[in-house]
Amino acid sequence: MNPAAVFVLMLGIGIPLTFIKSVILNVVVSSVCLAYLLFCKVKPKTLLTMLLVALPLAFGSYVSQRFYASHDQVHIAWIYATRIIAYLNLGATLTLPNSVENILFNLAEHLNFSKTFVYGMLSSFNMIHTIRVQWKRIRYSALVRGERYRLFQPALYLRIIVVSLNLSGDLAQAMTSQGFSEGFPRSRYEKDELPVWQWLLVSILIVSYVACAIIFKPW
Amino acid sequence: MTSLRLADVTFSYDDCEGPIVENFSYELDEGTISLISGPSGCGKSTVFKLMAGLLPQYGGKILSGKVLLENAEIESVVPFERAKRVAMLFQNPNRQFAMKTVFSQFVFALENLQLDHQEIEERINDALKRFELEDFKDRNLQELSGGEQQRIALALVYSLKSSVILLDEPFANVDPENRSKLLEDLKRLQKEQRKTILISDHDSSGYFGIVDHWYRFSSQGFVEKDVNELKTREQQPKVIGMPKNDARLFWDDLGFEVSKRKLLSNSSFCLPTGQIGLLSGKNGCGKSTLFACLCKLHEKTGKITFDQKDSDKIKLSKWAKNVGCAFQNSLDQFIKLTVEEEILASRKNTRHKDYWSEERIQKAIKALNLTGIMKHSVYRISGGQQKKLQLLVMLIMAQPILLIDEPFAGLDQESLEVSCSLLKETVENLQLSVLLISHQRVRVVSFMDYEISLENGILKEVSA
Amino acid sequence: MQTYDAKKKKKTWALKDVIFLAVIGIFFGIIYQVWSYAYYAMAATPLKPFANDATLGVWIMAGPLAGVLIQKIGSSVIGEMLAAAVEMLLFSSWGASTLISGFVQGIGSELGFAATGYRDWGKRGLLLSTLFTTIITFVWDLAQSGYMEYHLPLLTVLFVVRFISIGFFAGVLVAMIAKMVDKAGVLKK
């Protein structure tokens, strides 16, 4: 499916998921997502690792509710534990099968996201290696002076801001000199299609999910 | 043909500071290649960015005068229209790409010009073929060397069909082989396509027979010089001396890679105590990366030891107590807000509290001419002042091992002299081991005790 | 040759602003990787609600920081959303929940500045911003993280912990950073 459609689906299910208290529906959402991910040929090993990493967090939700919930602890504990997993799988349907570029391009193409944002984000993502090197340098610059940056020191953030300003200035100027013009049209070399049936499918899935929750109130 | 000229331009980055460019007039001679040389910080970059229309869009103000592209003020020309006429290559090759791969970068730029699918494809293929870069089409841009990146950038500019090409210190991170390739390509573009090309470079070697005009930018102003003078190559002075054997820092079988390219292998050396060594080598050969390895900031193979202790077994914070590093970019160094605070911070944690007495520090501040700016923000002083401050705070820290990357860039003659003397004096008195990178050799090498050179992945002693 | 009024453009979001905030977002992502181990260890136990609330301040700093740095309408919410998008696309696969909570947090801090009519980006604006963020994220967690199932005393404690965390990181610390940036003179307005 087109990432733009998946994005809408993710939010369309994700937002009501916050209010719908049902273990069964959480499990259904999780399973459908997992099936979709496998269908998209995401490696089962990746999925397994992802689930294993999230498990302790789900467990934390579970025991917290068992400890503190004011009523019906078991049911409620299961709701919030499965909700964590459902969120995770839902998010993975967008991020695992698609490249960052692909997601952002399609959001711009089909959901009218600002191109300034799309290309601004993309270009900064490509700087991640440079940013990591800079981060190491920032830390070393303090160590070499016998100090150490802590998370709560404003001086650390000043450094981050200075580096970010320089990087963003250089990059934005280069992009401008290559013709990027904010607010002006661009052509597209390659377009990903988003057929109407995908929008239809997305709508049906969201509506039936919410309807199910309201009408049947599953456990 | 595209006309581009600055008409009596006065430009300032900031209302409180004086203008960086004053009453400046210059017109590009169409169809020629021109070279502008001059020290860093003289305003070359500012002029280039004014001509590309990036200033004042990205800061500052034109106080008087105009920058005219085909008789329109360039500021008001939409960027994609500018790009068809004027394009620029930047100093930091890896900061000029928005996309991941070579191909997608071309697509990005050509989409900006609103070209259709077929036109985009044709232009990409044509450009890659012309510059013999077909093999690079699907390569990741961030994994290319500085030289390869600049060649891609030039091909990109070619595909935009811009008739004016501005190159601002384009060879700072480019190895000599790619530099001469690029110069050949530029000459070809001028001859075959009548492109107008303007290059700024602090190093004027290798331009004879290529450029039609040569200008020098300095505090005295902007003057055209005779291109025939480019023929006489300045003699580069040599370092006289040999490294001693007495050392605390050793490396053995050291090697490292940058973006999957091996830049050093099987290197062994001991860094002599009480001496200053010059680490030389062509642009892009890995000098700064060698420093990063010695600071444990870059992956390496082999072994580095300090006082017989293996670097892999020492925590970074402890390692930094013995191995100091002055980064090439001064702004990567400073941890405080004002000049005074910077000096105080070093004084607090120096390895030689007795040596760096209040009196000695004040003397150094005065010699470096920093007295008047003690309360200033380190971010608001000039590049030269930043360099001097950076050197001072690292000398006060006085780690037994000190690696210094380009400490003299942009310094005037007097500052250079004072900096070198201070460095020499400190090293001798405290018996530090210093390794230093400096592209400037004139008036510097007499302070150096030995030279090692990094060339084709091999580090070797240079003896005069 | 197409021309435009370059001066008029300055009010809207510029490419440089977007990249600036996104790069800061990536730095935060790197910081969070370190920070998240502590959170992770606590979140696997019944201490999870406390871990959530005590660390929340760090997660939401990006919003008010973007606010005081860019000082445009929407900068907090956009700054926070950008940080969330960076987090979602580069560092984790939580997708929906990262984006949604980013939005909720961003709205919280945006409302604070909006309440001053976007005139005060200093202490008053930040105080209001932390207050709104605390309330709005808390209300959201009543539903999302099941806080509404908890007893009132626990809720009170959590609320206070959250306000302290947000107040420090998204309030006091951001104010200190803003002051430093101002003194350093790196941002020209």
Image (cartoon, rainbow, N blue to C red):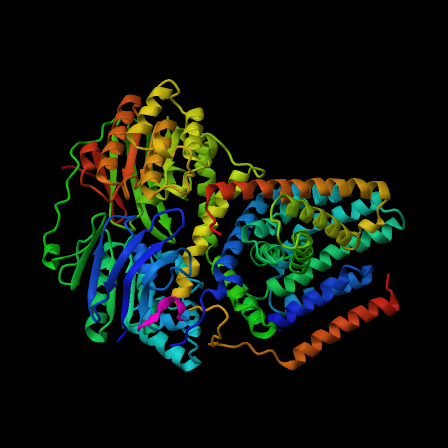
Q: Is residue A30 visible?
A: no
On screen, residue C43 versus residue B142, left or right, reads: right
Residue at 60% across / 70% down in the picture?
A3
Give the answer, above or below, for where B115 lies relative to B88.
below
Quarter holding the C terminus of chain B is top left
Residue B65 position in % (x across, y down): 32, 62
Residue at 64% across / 46% down in the picture?
C126
The range drawn in magenta is B70-77
Q: Nearer the viewer, residue B382 or B232?
A: B382
Give the answer, above or below, for where B405 lies relative to B398.
below
Residue C5 position in % (x across, y down): 45, 69
Residue at the outermost front position: B64
Total number of numbered discs in the rendering: 0
Residue at the outermost top position: B354
Q: Nearer the viewer, residue C15 or B353?
A: C15
Quarter holding the N terminus of chain B is bottom left
Residue B455 shown in magenta: no
Residue at 44% across / 42% down in the picture?
A137
Residue B76 shown in magenta: yes
Residue at the outermost right position: A71
Give residue A113's quadrant in the image. Answer: bottom right
On screen, residue B414 versus residue A43, left or right, reads: left
Residue B151 position in % (x across, y down): 30, 63
Residue B380 position in % (x across, y down): 40, 43
Give residue A106's quadrant in the image. Answer: bottom right
Residue at 15% across / 39% down in the picture?
B238
Give the answer, above or below, for where B8 lies relative to B447.
below
Q: Nearer the viewer, residue B192 or B372?
A: B372
On screen, residue B259 versus residue A98, left or right, reads: left
Q: Is residue B56 visible?
A: yes
